[in-house]
Image: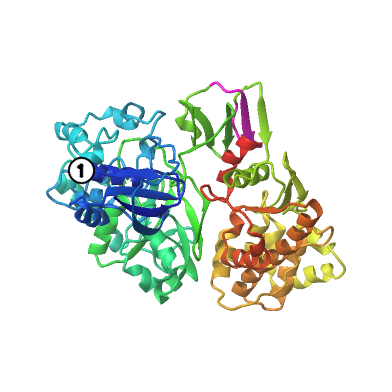
Amino acid sequence: MYFIFEIEFFSNKNYLSDLILAYAKQEQMKIDVIQSNDKIVMVFDKNDEQLESFLNGMEEVLPASLFLGNGKHYFSDVKPALLPITKVNLPINIAPCPTCQKEMFDVSSRRYYYPFTSCNHCGTQHPFLDKYPYDRTHTVMKFLVPCTDCQEEAKSNALRLDYPLISCIECGVSIRMLDKESEHLALNKGDFRKLFEVSGRAIAEGKSVLMKTAHGYRKFFKPTVEYSPVKSTLLMADSNGFNTHLMMVIQEFNALLSIERPLLRVATKSDELKALYGSSVQVKYPDDGMTMLLAREIMNTGLQYISYIECNTDEEADFLVDFDMPINAQKDTKIFINQDKKLFVSGERIVFPTVVENSKNSVSVAYGLACVKVDNLSIIDSVEVFDSVQTDALYVLEGEDFESGHSNEHRFLPWKASMMSVLAEHGKIGQKAIGVHFDGTLNFLYYNGKEVINAVPAIPFESDNLWEKISTLREGSDRLVVNYKKAYPEVFERLDNLAGDMDIFEVTAIALGLENESFEGISAQALSFLGKGGLQIDTRVKDNRFDNYAFLTSIMSYQLGDVENNFMCYSIYESFGDYIGEIVPQLMEKTEAKIITLTGETFANQSLYGRIQRTLGAKNPLMNKNFPIGKENAVYGAMYL
């Protein structure tokens, strides 16, 4: 008789199932672990005397994860028959697991306050990758020789067997702290602790610290009313501060504390955070060893949070904390949560690298990512980690700065590949579908089973000569321009002298006078509106096509009527939702398509997403599951063009 323990796990990442196996090996526990596309199944002998103690111990070893769902257990006379996922040794980029964290804060450990503490199943591995295949000789750690203790551990510690990045204070990466007058090198446990202690105190006293982390350089500071940049990220050092300062649902709280440590925009709650960041803020919980150790020292000063901006090494700061090892930094990943629905919005960390099926001998390249076959496996990762390969065909994003000289090179448009990525993930290739791609501009797509067609393209938006285009839009538009110039002379002047190509959201944010002049800024304002029901904002003028100028004119009209910004921003997304909910059924009826796909970062907005669910929810629109809904999905979808 078998005791079966199942945990929902909605990912093809295998670090959790491998951690369970390693822990079982450490505890000398007989167990079968099978990971399928949606769960991890553990099979035990029902009569094993170690069963209860093992399960209790596993609670201490396993981290929380974005991908974890509900668990259940049962007894069975036969083992479950499941199709396991393909397991591949790929470098991950997540926070340290509970075991590694304990080492970092255990003064008796040789990794006490060592920020590069990790094991086979956790930590910042990918930043140290140089080339595939993933082993020590293909990482920047190849320049460091493991000490005797690490060499022995790589043979005996179940969590670090043959671990490519094994190291400790004795043989690992050195860090140093510099100010304008001196340099301090950390050489032992006391030095490492002192360095982070000094950094934490400096920030608490109002100084800034530029720190190299596994995710690149970050400038850390204590935010004030005078200095809290709108594009900074709130680093919550103390988890108790979440409920004090932020309004979150339990799913958001769990996501932020998961081992994947995503970025998440949430509403502010405390008066002090509202004074600093307004109605919402982008939040992060410490995500690598450097940030985690700094956060501990920040808590010791009595602070619950600090802020940081991502920057370059030449950013001005009072102190610099650095190390000489080069890193291959990934873009951090933003997620969007609506009830139990979690979507990757944008970014690389957590999502990539990943293995995908690719029956063709082809390579695709988009937004600095590439899908390349390595030892008969197709891996998606940053272009830099692949050597040159032989391929029958090359698919490159239109506008991508990538020179190959390949005789069979194809250029593709982003919306085509994005729609194909959703169809491929859901097994709908070859079936008719209507797609909505909303990423700065709004396009309605039709896939006829062979190719993607832009069925209702947006009217092109050009930000130059804006007032001339608005004044000739329709009767009375010229009077609107005159009145707007009188009411908002500074904004009028700014919009009259726009430089370079700008999308409609940037221009809208400028018109509304938002500090964060971007889609993100409009989303933040929309999040602060707590009412129900919005204004109707024009989204089209002719041929059912989205007209940027009609949209902007409508917003300006409401501005002249003294409509509050948060109500306006909320209404923007509601109006888009109504427009999409009207056009999509018309296209489905004309084409007899039964499938809807939604792609683009713009859908990561609560009011728009909610409106789409009300207008199209019954038709079950499909979105990316394992890839970002934004531009990074294109490298995957291009494989199916």
Which residue is located at x 67 percent, y 66 percent? 491
Locate residue 368 relative to residue 505 in the image: left or right.
left
Q: Quadrant of residue 353?
A: top left
Is residue 628 rendered to the left or right of residue 43? right
The main secondary structure of the magenta stretch is: loop
> Where 308 falls versus 370 (above or below)?
below
Q: Is residue 203 visible?
A: yes
Above/below status of 504 relative to 242 = above
Q: Is residue 615 magenta?
A: no
The residue singled out by tag 1 in the image is 26
Residue at left 25%, top 41%? 159
**Direction left: furthest residue:** 108
The C terminus lies in which quarter of the figure? top right
The percent coordinates of residue 627 (x first, y second) are: 53, 47
Front residue of this view, candidates 114 and 576: 576
Q: Nearer the viewer, residue 81 or 113?
A: 81
Q: Residues within 10 Å of mark 1 (few under 14, many from 20)?
A: few
- Name the foreground residue: 197 vs 634: 634
